[in-house]
Image (cartoon, grey):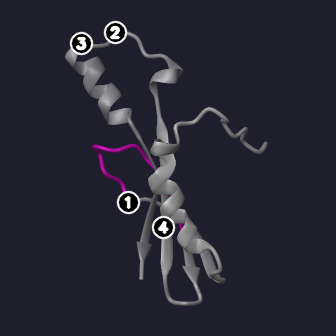
Amino acid sequence: MLKPKIATDADPRRLEFLRTTSERMVGKTIKRVSCAEREHDEDCHESDVLEIEFTDGSTLYIHTASNAQNIRDDVNSGRKRTIQASDFHADLHLAWED
């Protein structure tokens, strides 16, 4: 898999939460990493979860989220008839457990 190209024109406000939440990893030592599939929810797409456990006892969970449910609602209600690839958006969600 190729390394993704980083957009140079991204809105920094959109990335603020991701940046500040991920910066908590700086200086920590990784104890264990595991990969899993998020528990199924019929109102949500399938998603992988990356669990990173640190030696200080904290754990970072990273999973994806998208606007797939919004697009489904738009199509089912008739607000949209066709879907383009650019209509879909995916984000990383980070959750810490101390």
Q: Does label 4 or label 3 sit earlier along the sequence?
A: 4
Residue type, numbered disc 3: Gly
Q: Nearer the viewer, residue 15 or 92?
A: 15
Q: Does label 2 or label 1 sit earlier along the sequence?
A: 1
Q: CA distance from mark 2 to mark 3?
A: 6 Å
Q: Is residue 87 left or right of residue 3?
A: left
Q: CA distance from mark 4 to mark 3?
A: 36 Å
Q: Nearer the viewer, residue 41 or 51?
A: 51
Element type at marker 1?
Answer: loop
Question: Of tags 3 and 1, which is closer to the observer?
Answer: 3
Residue type, numbered disc 1: Glu
Q: Does label 3 or label 1 sit earlier along the sequence?
A: 1
> In the picture, residue 52 is in which quadrant?
bottom right
- Residue 21: percent from left, percent from top: 48, 64
| Residues at marks 2 and 3 touching, judged by CB atoms closer than 8 Å | yes
Marker disc for residue 81: 2
Residue under numbered circle 4:
61
Q: Is residue 36 visible?
A: no
What span is colored magenta in the figure? 39-51
Residue under numbered circle 3:
78
Residue under numbered circle 1:
39
Q: Does label 4 or label 2 sit earlier along the sequence?
A: 4
- Residue 22: percent from left, percent from top: 54, 64
Question: Of tags 4 and 1, which is closer to the observer?
Answer: 4
Q: Is residue 33 magenta?
A: no
